[in-house]
Image: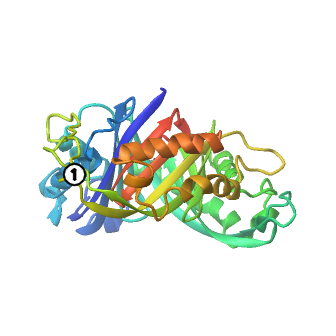
Amino acid sequence: MGEQTIYWAAAGFEAARRLDEVATEERQRGLHGHSFRVELQHRVPGSAPDCAPAPHHDLQQRLQEVLSLLDYQLLNDRLPQPTDRRVLHWIVQQLNLPGATHCKLWVGPRQGVIRDWTGQWHSWRRDRFEAAHRLPHVPAGHQCGRMHGHGFQVQLQWQSTDEARIQALQAHWQVLRQTLHQRCLNQVAGLEIPTSEMISRWIWLALKPSAPELGAVTIFETATCGAVFNGLEHGIWKDHSFDSATVLETQGPSAWSKGGMTPVGEALTPADEQIYGHTYVLRLGLVAPVEPLLGWTVDFGDVKALFAPVLACLDHQPLHEVLALRTHSQLTRWVYEQACLQLGALRRVSLWDTPDTGYTLEQDAHVFALTG
């Protein structure tokens, strides 16, 4: 696939619904409500135009406009039997965006559906287990060599949206979860080296025979790092944040209006410049084989240490002066190019300037195709 630039936007809405004909649980048949959230990604061939003003913000505005039609509404008034899949399908139709998109619907904090880049549908569920572990073969003095614990989060993704089938798959997971919850993972057969990579693969191998629809297993070891396994590749990510100043990007006409999406750029002039800032969140995604003795692809600590010189150039800096970076697309590309020099396994850089808007630059990061 080669290099891809992806615009990212998210927004939420509150709505009620009834699923009286399709619900597998009695409580879903009555009137009930959710906090819904949509995360939208749109691919741009090649690199993003460096002169584009802020197309990810325009995309987010367009998403908000569509979701406002559902906010504080009864979804049954918009579409019959508003299942998760039908709701997201309706949203995608209303957006009417040309090109490839990836959409993820959150129905509350623990479940939803995904329409992937190819138009295929997936369901996802998120759960949690509490466990202790230590990594037995790390160098002397490494903090993970000491016994410690985590509240691990697990996200399971299935290539199915049939609710009855999803309930059956969930039941398989709940049985397996009892093997992990409130346990020392080193004592679980097959998890003698319980890294996030090994845990995701262990769950995959345990569930796949009874759940052929399983598409990916994602482990959130902490709020800022984790691993994903899709049966073929291992990927990990590590988040960083930095606080920086920049200049306001000139806003032209909305580049993402319904019926067309051509980024519109305007050159900055001194009169247009307005200094402001962000707490940026940066996610590095790496893909590599698992090292058998250590059980990881790349040590999270090594990622942090190797990336530290790049982060120092960004944190508490006026980016437009120090690095002459005036757009978020320029900043994302600069980070990617600098991080690649330190991290050979790097395949993806995601940069969020707000919790609801961002950019991604990636190189054939197939393992992250569903997890985003």
Q: How many marks?
A: 1
Percent position of residue 123, x then y: 43, 49
Q: Quadrant of residue 281?
A: bottom left
Residue 369 visible (yes or no): yes
The residue sitting at the front extreme is 270
Q: Residue at x 71, y 51 (%)?
A: 198
Percent position of residue 331, x then y: 42, 47
Residue in front for this viewpoint, 151 or 55: 55
Taking 277 as reference, is 52 above or below it?
above
Q: Quadrant of residue 266?
A: top left
Q: Is residue 274 left or right of residue 314?
A: left
Percent position of residue 200, x then y: 64, 51
Disc 1 residue type (three-letter)? Pro
Residue 160 visible (yes or no): no
- Residue for badge 1: 270
Percent position of residue 368, x then y: 52, 43
Instruction: Judge the density around disc 1: few (<14), some (14-19), many (≥20) Cα neighbours within 10 Å.
Output: few
Q: Residue at x 44, y 45 (%)?
A: 332
Coloring scheme used: rainbow
Q: Residue at x 30, y 66 (%)?
A: 35
Taking 253 as reference, is 237 above or below it?
below
Residue in front for this viewpoint, 258 or 76: 258
Q: Is residue 189 left or right of residue 311?
A: right
The residue sitting at the top extreme is 1
Q: Is residue 372 left or right of residue 39?
A: right
Q: Residue at x 81, y 45 (%)?
A: 292
Residue in front for this viewpoint, 314 or 239: 314
- Secondary element type, mark 1: loop
